[in-house]
Image (tube, helix red, strand yellow):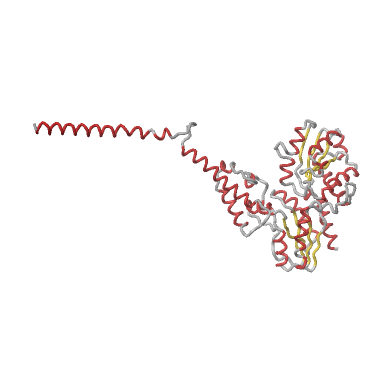
Amino acid sequence: MKRNMSVLLAALLALMLCVSGCGGKEAEPAAEAAPEEAQDPEGTEPEEAAEELSDQEKADEVAALIDAIYVQKRTDETDAQCTAAKEAWDELTDAQKELVEGENADPDYFGRDTGDASKDDPLNQDEIGENEILVVSFGTSFNDSRVEDIGGIEGALMTANPRWSVRRAFTAQIIINHVQARDGEHIDNMAQALERAVANGVKNLVVQPTHLMHGAEYDELMEAVEAYQDKFESVKVAEPLLGQAGTDATVINEDKKVVAEAVTAEAVKEAGYDSLDAAKEDGVAFVFLGHGTSHTAKVSYSQMQTQMGDLGYDNVFIGTVEGEPEETACEAVIEAVAGSGYSKVVLRPLMVVAGDHANNDMAGDDEDSWKSMFTASGKFDQVDAQIAGLGQITSIQDLYVAHTAAVME
């Protein structure tokens, strides 16, 4: 009896072990199916989704670094920030670079080809001597324009004043940072340039602005210079390109006449006509585009339109990117040109440099560029754009030289 009971218990125990072992093996396939259930409805693997997010995160980091240097104030951290932004950009793949988008950042900040920066001289050397001409510009991040337009004016001043050291300053720290981060080129701002002059023992300082008029940037320049008046034996500031701004649109001067004749002659020549009258007979109107401003100096644009009329340039019109004065807004200029019966339009900058405004706001492919809006109006058979700054025109360079000579006398 006892033996039979032992045999029965042994058999029951063996059965239980078998059932337990078989059940453990059957559970394994369910565990293997788990990764398939983790797929999203689109069938994207979690690792792929994480990789895509990582690309955007890397691009966002670079965008934040660019936005950090897209500022008008220089600090002790600016140099390091410029270096960090470029190094982070260089580490991105081409696909990641296309994802860069911030408040002011985009792939063009580092990626756009604007020419060879190595051809530019920042004119920030020491050993200046006692006499310095400081050429002050708003600035541009477009390398070719910096060489041809700003460099053209600086070169003309060097040639005309061999006994003076010509140095450069930009008033736009945003542009200084852009050029430094992208190209490794260091350009002085106003404070740096003036400190350099003091440190080098300059006695006689002449400041030549390349600005178009007595606007907000000119006012800021004057404030910066006044803070250093007692650092030099003499400080003189020359006139901007268009000279003094009159009280209303009827007041013009010789400077505006020189500029009007110079830019018109260059535009007519580049368009392939022997004269402005020949272009007019062919139905061509020229539109010269300035920046525009809310400053009282905006009357200078109206005065330039008056000057064109006084010269008999009936097929020349003045516009501004900002649309100030009102008659210089794009819609107003389109109506004026079409209302005068012209079927062809040539756009050209009324700016010292052919930088961002000329390439994008005037001649860009976006629907809000002047070229696009003139074309979209349907009022013209042909709309062309000439991208060239005033600074590369010889007679404009000569006018700056004359302004510098006037204050030296």
Q: State the quadrant of the C terminus.
A: bottom right
Q: Residue at x 71, y 45 (%)?
A: 356
Q: Nearer the viewer, residue 366 or 185?
A: 366
Of residue 12 and residue 318, the one placed in the foreground of this image is 12
| Figure quadrant of the N terminus | top left
The answer to whether residue 247 is above or below residue 236 is above
Q: Nearer the viewer, residue 323 or 280?
A: 323
Instruction: Locate residue 25, reporting x and y percent.
Output: 29, 33
Q: Please tell me which residue is depicted at 18% across the width and 32% down the height of the picture.
A: 12
Q: Position of residue 244 (x, y in %)?
A: 85, 54
Which image quadrant is residue 15 in?
Answer: top left
Residue 129 on image: x %, y %: 74, 67
* Total numbered circles: 0
Residue 266, located in which quarter of the rendered image? top right
- Decide if residue 40 is on the left or right side of residue 361: left
Q: Is residue 300 left or right of residue 67?
A: right
Residue 107 position within the rendered picture, expressed as x and y whole percent measured from the top left: 62, 44
